[in-house]
Image (cartoon, grey):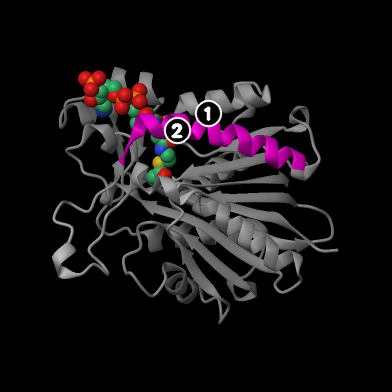
Amino acid sequence: MKYSCIRGTGSYLPAQVVTNYDLEKKIETTHQWIVERTGIHSRHIAEDHESALSMAEAAGRAALAMAGIAAADLDMIIVATTTPERVFPATACELQAALGAGQCPAFDLNATACAGFMYGIGIADQFIRTGKIKHALVIGSEMMSRIVDWSDRRTCVLFGDGAGAVVLSSSDTPGIMTTCLHADGRFVDMLNIPSNLGRPTSRKFTGQAVLNMQGNTLFRQAVNILGGLFDETLAAGGVSAKEIDWLIPHQANLRIIDAMAKKLDLPTERVAITLATHANTSSASIPLALDGSVRDGRIKRGDLLLLEGFGGGLAWGSALVRF
Ligand code: ACO
């Protein structure tokens, strides 16, 4: 029986930091409101020369280096991003060429937004388990600063840019113990970015193609859905909440993360939280949090991790991982 395991992690953050105090000067908001309602203090914002591709490449190279795998050994590249520079080809194809990774399958996951990285893990894990492939690079890379309306205080304060990556490799022992993926398209209006692509001229969208979010309703959905997702994941993996060493959550709101830690009865020190300095980097937030905690030595080999993501779709997913 084959399993997949996380062999390496990597991440990239743009150098430019924008604080809540910087935002106070541009829109009607306060540091206090943002911290109290979200837990966010600052975020990294990309410069013009950076892209989802350049950030994915930096994060991917770091993960490959930690894994000790050459790009040429990759059998699959998956990039979760809602901010590709082109509609097609996929950012993953451009990344494959940039890394010199050979002719392995390479594709993007965009529609699952913040849950995109979890979908990538779920897909790569299945290919590795069946023996079809040995090594996969799974990345979340997001330029959220380019899809928010910087005059809309309800959304622009929440997001940041960055990328995170993992190398999944074939293993005789688990590794990825289980993954759970879900979506509910009845809630498309809660979180979306409209587009003119594919619309007839008569129905062209005339507003600004930026992120729309019904924050309050979404908040309640997130807490409900993630609670159920935890129960499902623990049952599927055959473990109890007490056995979890680390929660690696999507970073949308500290109040949601706190509620999830409480559900697992985990102390805050056992939750990888990057929200204060990264804000919400959508599909990049989970691998960014994972890589940070691995590289500073808090997460150790053998630890049992619960990863969870939730976002537009609505779509959500989890993985139970013996690191
Ligand atoms: N500064 C000051 N005041 C603000 C700001 C701001 N930046 N933003 C909103 N307000 C005001 C509102 O206008 C409102 O004022 P009003 O009562 O006079 O109308 C008041 O603050 C309260 O607004 P709410 O939206 O009710 O605030 P809430 O406490 O719900 O916090 C937030 C908003 C942070 C967005 C929260 O609802 C949230 O985190 N939701 C979940 C987000 C999430 O999980 N997203 C999924 C993943 S994201 C992805 O997939 C891309």
Q: Nearer the viewer, residue 308 or 199?
A: 199
Residue 24 in the image: x percent, y percent?
A: 20, 26
Mark 2 lies on residue:
275
Q: Nearer the viewer, residue 167 or 264?
A: 264
Q: Which mark is residue 208?
A: none
Left/right of residue 208 with respect to residue 301 in the rendered view = left
Q: The N terminus lies in which quarter of the figure? A: bottom right
**Distance from Cα at disc 2 to Cα at disc 1:** 10 Å
Residue range in magenta is: 213-235
Left/right of residue 157 with respect to residue 139 in the rendered view = left
Residue 312 in the image: x percent, y percent?
A: 42, 47
Q: Is residue 107 magenta?
A: no
Q: Quadrant of residue 159?
A: top left
Left/right of residue 275 with respect to residue 168 in the rendered view = left
Q: Secondary structure at mark 1?
A: helix
Looking at the picture, does residue 285 appear above or below residue 203? above
Left/right of residue 273 with respect to residue 29 in the rendered view = right
Query: Which residue corresponds to the image point at 47% horizontal and 34% vertical from the top-left?
Result: 221
Q: Which mark is residue 257?
A: 1
Badge 2 amino acid: Leu
Q: Main secondary structure of the magenta part?
A: helix
Residue 234 in the image: x percent, y percent?
A: 73, 38
Q: Are marks 2 and 1 in contact (CB under 8 Å)?
A: yes
Q: Quadrant of residue 291?
A: top right
Q: Quadrant of residue 200?
A: bottom left
Q: Is residue 227 magenta?
A: yes
Point out the residue furthest to the bottom here: 103
Query: Which residue corresponds to the image point at 42% horizontal and 71% vertical from the top-left?
Result: 90
Q: Residues within 10 Å of mark 2 (few under 14, many from 20)?
A: many
